Image (spheres, rainbow, N blue to C red):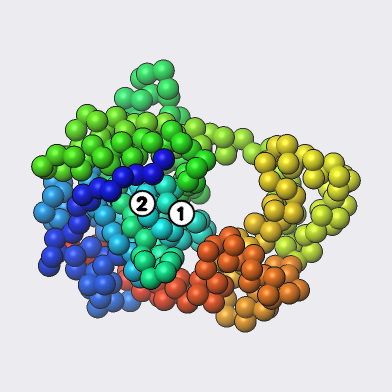
Amino acid sequence: MDTPTLRLPRLTAGGDERYADHTRTGRAAADAADTGADAPMTSFDTIAAASAHLDKDDDFGVIGHDLDHPSQLHRHDYLEITHALKGTVLVWVQGETCVLEAGGTVLVKPGARHLISPIIENGRAPIEADVLIRSRLVESMLTVSGSGAHEDMALRQWLDDPSQSYCLLEAGHHPAGQAAISRMLMAYCAGERYRPNLAVIGGLLELMHTASDALESRMHIDPLIGAIIDVITKDPSRATNDGIADTLGYSVGYLSRYVRKHDGRTLGRLINEERLRQAAELLITGDQPIAEVAHAVGYDSAAYFHKLFRDRYLTTPSQYRNDFRIALTHRVPSTTIIK
């Protein structure tokens, strides 16, 4: 379901230097601060002060962005829901990269280090909507949903689990959630003043239900699928169909059928996606030439690795490294709040 054209609110002119996420002036303000080892923390009150439409007492707001450059590495003191309206963006959260295509949504927990990099297609920048929800409103909504028939326990556990940082709802995989955020954004943008009315909160509750269901399904990873992923992770360069089957004591045919039935992917696709995930991390954290990165994760052909990486992340390995390296070097102390 495509979200129709919306009159998305934007940051006011002259106020965006206080918002250190996607604006060039925001990045310049952060660069002028003392350098350090962590990302700047942006507060909900800071965003409210930089926006003419957002009231800090609402504990909720939406801001639209045309992404023509990577964001700065940053954190928030609120739950952020990023929804891709047009085009595709890459979202890096705590060392993991996910592809957010039009219609896709990602929830990023308060305090999680993250950044967003656009995929520029035919000269057109992607458009995304950021939904900002203060933690006390999230808690109130979880209390309301927990008192009804649908208890969002998985979402609450996710928020409380320090090892978890984001929840991805891929475009086309969660139609109920996609419809919910579309209705929520339309309701928020429909009136003369941007306010979280009952229709907005209703859409947000539906989206939270979808996220909770997705998280719950991911909590119950099949033991054999988990064992396969562990084998790939430990040594991706040697993770072949035959090698994994020998390590786990099964035939290749049995493992292939099992993965297809219980995971939905082929065994080969599972191997490639885990290899590419590790390659993405190496491209950012290391200085190895791309051909060496390809070999380290099991690809003898750099050209084949290039093709698979582009198919997975919609950008080349060199462009991926360049965009995220630049963004990740823009750092200020963890105690700093951009104001």
Residue 56 seen in the figure: yes
Q: Quadrant of the N terminus?
A: top left
The label shown at residue 85 is 2
Q: Is residue 100 above or below residue 257?
A: below
Percent position (x, y) of residue 215?
51, 38
Q: Secondary structure at mark 1?
A: strand
Instruction: Say above or below: 219 vs 118.
Output: above
Q: Position of residue 5 (x, y in %)?
A: 28, 48
Observer-nearest residue: 224 or 61? 61
Dot 2 or dot 1: first in sequence order is: 2
Please provide percent x and percent y for residue 334. 33, 64
Q: Is residue 70 left or right of residue 317?
A: left
Residue lying at 31% horizontally and 33% vertically, measured from the top left? 203
**In the picture, which quadrant includes the C terminus?**
bottom left
Residue identified by numbered label 1 = 100
Nearest to viewer (mark 2 / mark 1): 2
Dot 1 amino acid type = Leu
Quadrant in the rendering for residue 259: top right
Q: Quick one: SS at disc 2?
A: strand
Tag of residue 38 = none
Q: Residue at x 37, y 55 (%)?
A: 86
Q: Is residue 66 above or below residue 230?
A: below
Amino acid type assigned to the residue bearing label 2 in the image = Leu
Rendered residue at 31%/45% (across/down): 4
Instruction: Classify residue 134 by image quadrant.
Output: top left
Residue 332 pos. (x, y %): 32, 71
